[in-house]
Amino acid sequence: MTLAEILPYLLKGTWVTVEITLVSIVLALLMAFLAGIARVSEHRLVRWIARGYVELFRGTSLLVQMFWIYYALPMLGVEMSAFTAGVLTLGLNIGAYGAEVVRGAILAVPKEQYEASIALNFTPLRRLWQIILPQAIPAMIPPFGNNAIELLKGTALVSLITLHDLTFSGQLLRNLTYQTADIFSLVLLLYFVIALLITAVVRLLERRLGVGLDRGGMAR
């Protein structure tokens, strides 16, 4: 097969990879903020639950987590599609790493900001929403970008639970044509292009937030 014939098949798998990546990033961000904020909660039980989640997903293999969710959960009566299992695993796993990013950024906000908000009689929720997060989020963007790239690379594992993603497409074509070098060179290139797009979005967010800071939109 020529490269012109191979590329359309790979692009179909690429679209699946992009879908999984985008949906997983949304879930990962949600879990990162929920668990990260819970990690600095005043309630000990909330902190323990969040820490348990973070340590479990950071301390075990992503592949084993995916196999457990896709193959073991149905034995417990929880059925889900391969797409849902892949997104859930990637979102929970990367969300655990993101939670530590959120926790670190929140703790890096100067104590004077907390004291000022308490003096102004802000509720804990208002303090978090209006004072802490606006200053902490800019510091989260670069590591969140790294986490998104790691998530993209992790999507290759969904081929092992029958999802027809970019990696699966490459393996299938390789088995049919034996053009290993050509096919996996294209696969590498397509993953690289997606990673470049993610990096571009992250840098755009960094610039936008940087402009807001420079204009006095947030306290430095």
Image (cartoon, rainbow, N blue to C red):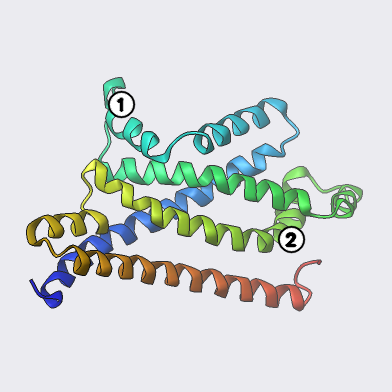
Q: What element carries label 1?
A: helix
The quarter holding residue 41 reads top right
Residue at 46% x, 55% y: name it. 150
Residue type highlighted by circle 1: Ala
Quadrant of the frame with the N terminus: bottom left
Residue type highlighted by circle 2: Gln
The quarter holding residue 96 reads top right
Drawn side of residue 188 relative to residue 105, left or right: left
Camera-near label (2 vs 1) is 1
| Mark 1 surroundings: few (<14), some (14-19) or many (≥20) residues within 10 A | some
Q: Where is residue 188 in the image (x, y as percent from the top left)?
A: 32, 66
Residue at 21% x, 53% y: name it. 168
- What count of labels does the image hold? 2
Q: Position of residue 219 (x, y in %)?
A: 81, 66
Question: Is 72 placed above or below 13 here?
Answer: above
Question: Is 53 placed above or below 185 here?
Answer: above
Drawn side of residue 96 relative to residue 168, left or right: right
Q: What element carries label 2?
A: helix
Residue at 20% x, 59% y: name it. 170
Extreme-top residue of the structure: 76
Closest to the observer, 90 or 172: 172
- Which circle marks residue 114 in the picture? none
- Which circle marks residue 135 in the picture? 2
Q: Distance between the residues labelled 2 and 1?
A: 42 Å
Drawn side of residue 167 relative to residue 100, left or right: left
Quadrant of the frame with the C terminus: bottom right
| Mark 2 surroundings: few (<14), some (14-19) or many (≥20) residues within 10 A | many
Residue under numbered circle 1: 72
Q: Where is residue 12 in the image (x, y as percent from the top left)?
A: 20, 64
Residue at 44% x, 46% y: name it. 91
Closest to the observer, 112 or 152: 152
Q: Earlier in the sequence, mark 2 or mark 1?
A: 1
